[in-house]
Amino acid sequence: MSGVIDVQEIDLDAVREQVDAVLEDFLEDKAGAAARRSHPPEVANTLRAFLAAGGKRVRALLCVVGWHAAGGSEDRAAVLRVAASLELFVAFALIHDDIMDDSAVRRGRPAVHRALCTRLGQSSRAERLGAGGALLVGNLALIWAQELLHTADLPLRRRRTVHALYDAMLEEVMYGQYLDVMGTGPDDDIDAALRIARYKTATATVERPLQLGAAVAGADDTTVNLCTALGLPLGEAFQIRDDLLDVFGSTDGACTPGLGDLREGKRTVLLALGLRAATPAQQRRLRSLVGRADLDEHGAAEVRAILEETGARRRTEHMITSRYEQALRVLDAAALPTAASRALRALAVTATQYTS
Amino acid sequence: MSGVIDVQEIDLDAVREQVDAVLEDFLEDKAGAAARRSHPPEVANTLRAFLAAGGKRVRALLCVVGWHAAGGSEDRAAVLRVAASLELFVAFALIHDDIMDDSAVRRGRPAVHRALCTRLGQSSRAERLGAGGALLVGNLALIWAQELLHTADLPLRRRRTVHALYDAMLEEVMYGQYLDVMGTGPDDDIDAALRIARYKTATATVERPLQLGAAVAGADDTTVNLCTALGLPLGEAFQIRDDLLDVFGSTDGACTPGLGDLREGKRTVLLALGLRAATPAQQRRLRSLVGRADLDEHGAAEVRAILEETGARRRTEHMITSRYEQALRVLDAAALPTAASRALRALAVTATQYTS
């Protein structure tokens, strides 16, 4: 609880530790309760390991900063609980995402469904059963995220606002993923790609966490609107950059280029820009390569070359920068407490220079 | 609202219609809101169709009857909302269950993941993407079940009790399914099979719905304990009968015998009893046939014959009857309002003579 309130700096490292302590206590209790009742404690322990393996806790930090921005000073335990809930929600979304994409690796370790599959051994059904086990671990992450939320000690009106915001966020993310999964594959419709990015990730990454923190502090409309004005550009930049990193990796080498989105044929802004600027011959190559489950490094290199030649990569980077700058302009114009404003500038960098 | 309170009979058909009206209004609102916001309204509509295709609403009815049993008279809107939430929770559990088991049919129609797979057409990824879409539809059913729950208008103390009971139920079901999926396949451990049945289905089918309704009415400890005394035997009977129907079908032909549990190698009481009473030769046959993904009707007929010969089928039927009778004894000894007691007797028959 040390020195986070009414100071010029919000100690984001301290906040991260406090959020992690809430998560660890909660999941340790769950593992203990499971063991006492002949339930499998490994579910809670799988989630503890998942959280311990990484994650920047961006959403939790934004939630606490949103609370500061709205003048939060009481209810610190409540905002930490809401912030922790967001991180369990992220775990749920990532574990299910990895099942749907059949991703092998998450945070440098085998994805949960792959780890469970390995544990089941040589059975011919191990793959399906491992996915089933991971689906259930993900479900419990969501169920526990909601438990953390509704056990946060809040006055009735704020509780209602917090629940309404959280429900809206959950719906947006599910709808965005649904459009992603059931969609038609990449085309040159940049607005459609942006819409998917917005629902799947953008609002849940910045806008909703900021609003949730602000709502815990009983924010007025000005602050809630500021969360949106700030959250939308930063959230979009976050997702666009994520798509860029998936294809090109990061310049510092922390994130290596991959084949995931290209093989999936994900509908990203990057690919929409590429298709739009491509010559007919390049369009044919992109359409024949992207979305192939057997795309190899050679094919991926050709796609990357076309995305460079058409200027799609450069334009995508520009879209990130312009959104980052837009967020800074919003911050400049807002009359926020200094500490909250500074923390938001730092988090804006973290969110748009996301490298893992 | 007609004549359900303070009468000698609870009109269960009327309750069912009221619960369905809550569900229909809620999901119609969701579909409308989605359409207005460029979200896919088909998710809410898929759930409406799923609910319209069948289901006896046993859990919703038990919830309302539990409320009557605890002397409920106010908060009728609240208890209907909690009851409706239970049915969305069931939809979530069944949709995910069908993905995990890759079941083709649910309530006489293609399972959700199969229907979405068909819609995606000839793509080589249709199967995985259809499962992904269904996973998300299931997630939204859970998210909306929780929304129905936490928007029920309840005083703080009752709200806390309701949430704690609901959270316990969600955990039990997820843990039960997890044990089912990650388990070792059938053996002769009857207690282990009963434990899986208890967590996967039993508590969530009878005990928790009764307790939730009672909690909405602010039940005292006597009523809560009665819910458990009644709920455990009835819930177990319900699950044991479900396992029996899966293998043998129903005598009235409404439910045809299937291959699902046998191919999956589900750890059921029926199979545990069979393995325990089998000769060494029969044991070898059971172990070689059950759990084979390619088990055919011929092999299934051999399994059924062994389950008959060993007396496992008869003993399983006896376990159902004895649990039903135990529940009736609990009811006889309890001082419940007449209407609630009668309704519980009727629902005890429905739950243990479940035929579809």
Image (cartoon, coloured by chain):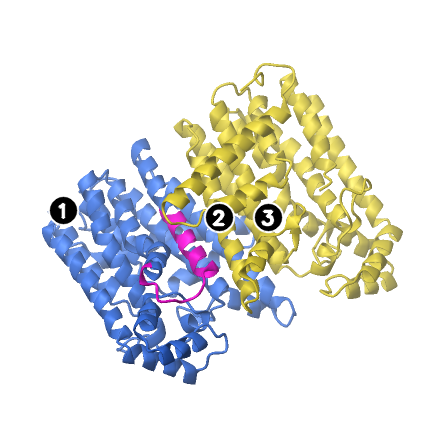
Chain colours: A yellow, B blue
What residue is rendered at 30% in x and 48% in y? B80
Q: Which residue is mark 1?
A: B6
Location of residue B331 with respect to A62 vertically, above or below: below
Q: Is residue B263 left or right of residue A62?
A: left
Marks 1/2: CA distance? Answer: 45 Å
Judging by the rendered image, the residue that carries numbered circle 2 is: A43
Amino acid on which the number 1 mark rests in the picture: Asp
- Residue extending farthest to the bottom is B298
The answer as to whether the residues below labels 1 and 3 share one chain is no
What chain does badge 3 belong to? A
Residue segment shown in magenta: B169-191
For mark 2, does the 10 Å Cα neighbourhood hold few (<14), some (14 to 19), or many (20 or more) residues?
many
Question: Would you name the residue on which mark 3 appears?
Answer: A94
- B185 part of magenta stretch: yes
Which dot, 3 or 2, sits closer to the camera? 2
**Disc assigned to residue A279:** none
Q: Residues under labels 1 and 3: Cα distance? A: 50 Å
The part of the image, by quadrant, that contains residue A304 is: bottom right
Tell me the chain of label 2.
A
Residue kind at label 3, given as amino acid type: Leu
Q: Toward which corner of the image does residue B118 lie, by quadrant?
A: bottom right
